[in-house]
Amino acid sequence: MSMKQQPKFSQQQQQRQDEQQAAGHTNRQQAETAREFASAEEVLRFDAASTTVPPEIAQRLKASAASLAPGQTKSWWRNLFGR
């Protein structure tokens, strides 16, 4: 090998080491932020707590919920059997 190829090789090696260190750092960050949930309900609760609802949708939801009076709807089995 000539002298000119030696520095280029060490630069590539250094670049690979830097990339591996950066990837290791990223993996550690992901591991720290990863969460484990026991059930789907926990996932939904966590998501609902961390997600903000856009104001337009919140207004539409409130209007829709207000139009439903409590007890106005029948349960599915009463609709099925006609009671």
Image (cartoon, rainbow, N blue to C red):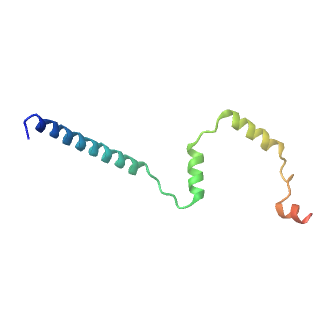
Q: Quadrant of residue 14?
A: top left
Q: Which residue is drawn at 16% across and 36% down?
A: 8
Left or right of 64: which side holds 12? left
Q: Which residue is drawn at 58% across and 46% down?
A: 49
Left or right of 21: which side holds 38? right
Residue 63 in percent (x, y) is at 78, 38
Residue 31 in percent (x, y) is at 39, 51
Which residue extends farthest right?
83
* 49 relative to 75, above or below: above
Which residue extends farthest front?
1
Number of marks: 0
* 37 relative to 1, above or below: below
Left or right of 66: which side holds 13? left
Q: In which quarter of the image is residue 60?
A: top right
Viewer-side residue, 9 vs 19 = 9
Viewer-side residue, 5 vs 58 = 5
* 38 relative to 9, above or below: below
Q: Which residue is drawn at 83% across and 42% down?
A: 67
Residue 16 in percent (x, y) is at 24, 43
- In the rendered image, which quarter contains the C terminus? bottom right
Which residue extends farthest bottom?
81
- In the rendered image, which quarter contains the N terminus? top left
Residue 7 in percent (x, y) is at 13, 36
Q: Residue at x 86, y 57 (%)?
A: 74
